[in-house]
Amino acid sequence: MGTVRRAAAIAGRAANDLLGFLVFTLLDLLDLLLCFSYKLADYAAEAQWKPCYCFASPGRGGAGGSGGVFVLSVLSSTKLQLEDISDTLFRRPSVVSDVARAALQKLNVRRGPPSAAAAPVRVRPTRKGDGFTVNNSTVVRMLQGKVGGDKPSTAPCWSDCHCDSCCPRGSPDELYVYVECPTDGKAAKEDVLFIHGFISSSAFWTETVFRHLSADARSRYRLLAVDLLGFGKSPKPSDSLYTLREHVDTIDRSVLRRYGVKSFHLVGHSLGSLLALALAAKHPAAVKSITILAPPYFPVPKGVQRTQYLLRRVAPRRVWPLITFGASVICWYEHISRTVCLVLCKHHRFWEKSFKLATRNRVRTYLMDGFFCHAHHASWHTMHNILCGSSGRVEEFMDAVRERLSCDVVVFHGKGDELLPVECSYAVKARIPRARVEVVDGVDHITVVVGRQKVFAGELEEIWRNAKAESTVVAD
């Protein structure tokens, strides 16, 4: 019986791999077709070609440089480092791209050596001895804007929604923050910062956990839930690279400084758990407890290219399960994912009204609202630059939490999570031995909170009560 099951499992995996090869080869072709289609549409709508990450030609060299090789010195004042940018933005191998690259190489051999204008753009990082070559015009253009060159327009693209929720007025660096103060009018004794996950919003917390906290907790804590840069009601600047550094800095300015937060508890879900660890490493003396759920952390084996390994772990290009297929489409296909945003996000008001009408307004739509209210360039850069490109930085953050903080670290993970396996949470514990891992049966990536919000609210209150009155920073 066991032999039959193993054989069936092997056959199922083989069928999944074969079907995945066929489906993703077709998607490779479709994405290439959409690339040219969007270039024509962008030119027709806005009289200019919108850059994308499909091609590896830097165009006409650098900003004011000569010979086509542009050396970009990363200034410390820009708060930008090359390690923040993932090469998965422009290196995503596929059957179609490999064939096209081979054909171009043969064509170049016939024509002779490449011209200077086609030379790669070399970027000098801040660390000595670390080489980094960027051979994509879009990366170069974005970097030039960051260090004072020609800055792209911050106006939303024609394919994005222009409503007030998607394009809030005001400072592009000021995030939307939902704040709930004690109902009795007294000053809060402690602060709690909630950070949502990828393609979500603060409603992930306000519509679930906030509603089930006890009266005692509501009278003691000030609750702050932030919409991350590019999501929900927060700004979605088109000139942002949405790196981990940018996300953390905007949270720092919009929440901690703006509301005078001196010490706080941290709660983060999925991608938000990485940002929570980054904030903890940045403010070690201020953190009272850390609670993270379904952290997307995969230790990278030695000798393996880090970003490409993580891309295949997060999005392994499989058609089943469906959540993995969705993640693969979002990660691998810039123009297909833009089409999804064009159909769903740009017309989110239509879909929201249709859903409410179909359900007679009996089903809360906060998860849909969080998914719809984002821009494609925000989700695309956040996915690659944080989930794929920040593993090394996240390990540094976890080391800082282990060595410089003594606060409690609790990790929750759904046993049925098909997007991020439970091993991710155990990998966090391996890095931070004092972390406590709670594996919850019968729940997945979303239902680890949604559906059990009352229970989870009680678990959070217990974590906050048990936290030490004042976090202790261990001397370096």
Image (cartoon, rainbow, N blue to C red):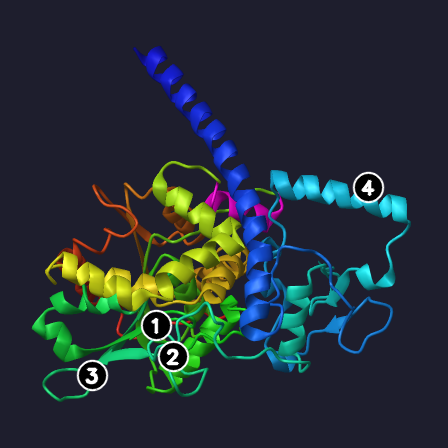
Range of magenta residues: 304-316
Residue 48 relative to residue 245: left or right: right
Whether tag 3 and tag 2 are in contact, CB under 8 A, the answer is: no
Q: Which mark is residue 385?
A: none
Whether residue 159 sits left or right of residue 416 in the image: it is: right
Residue tagged 4: 106
Q: Which residue is mark 1?
A: 227
**SS label for mark 1:** loop
Foreground residue among 201 and 474: 201
Q: Mark yes or no: residue 416 visible.
A: yes
- Which mark is first along the chain, 4 or 1? 4
Q: What's the amino acid at mark 1?
A: Asp
Q: What residue lies at 16% left-to-right and 53% top-to-bottom?
A: 451
Q: Are marks 1 and 2 in contact (CB under 8 Å)?
A: yes
Quickly name the residue at label 3: 188
Residue 315, position in %: x, y?
Answer: 47, 45
In terms of secondary structure, what is the magenta stretch mainly? helix
Mark 4 closeness class: few <14, some 14–19, many ≥20 residues within 10 Å: few
Instruction: Specify which label sits upstream in the sequence, 1 or 2.
Output: 2
Residue 303 shows in this picture:
no
Of residues 12 and 48, which is closer to you in this image? 48
Tell me whether the residue at label 4 lies in contact with that at label 2, contact meaning CB atoms closer than 8 angstroms: no
Which residue is the site of mark 2? Answer: 175
Mark 4–mark 2 Cα distance, whole angstroms, equals: 49 Å
In the picture, measured across the screen, residue 84 lies left or right of residue 195, that is right
Say whether disc 4 or disc 2 marks the residue closer to the N-terminus.
4
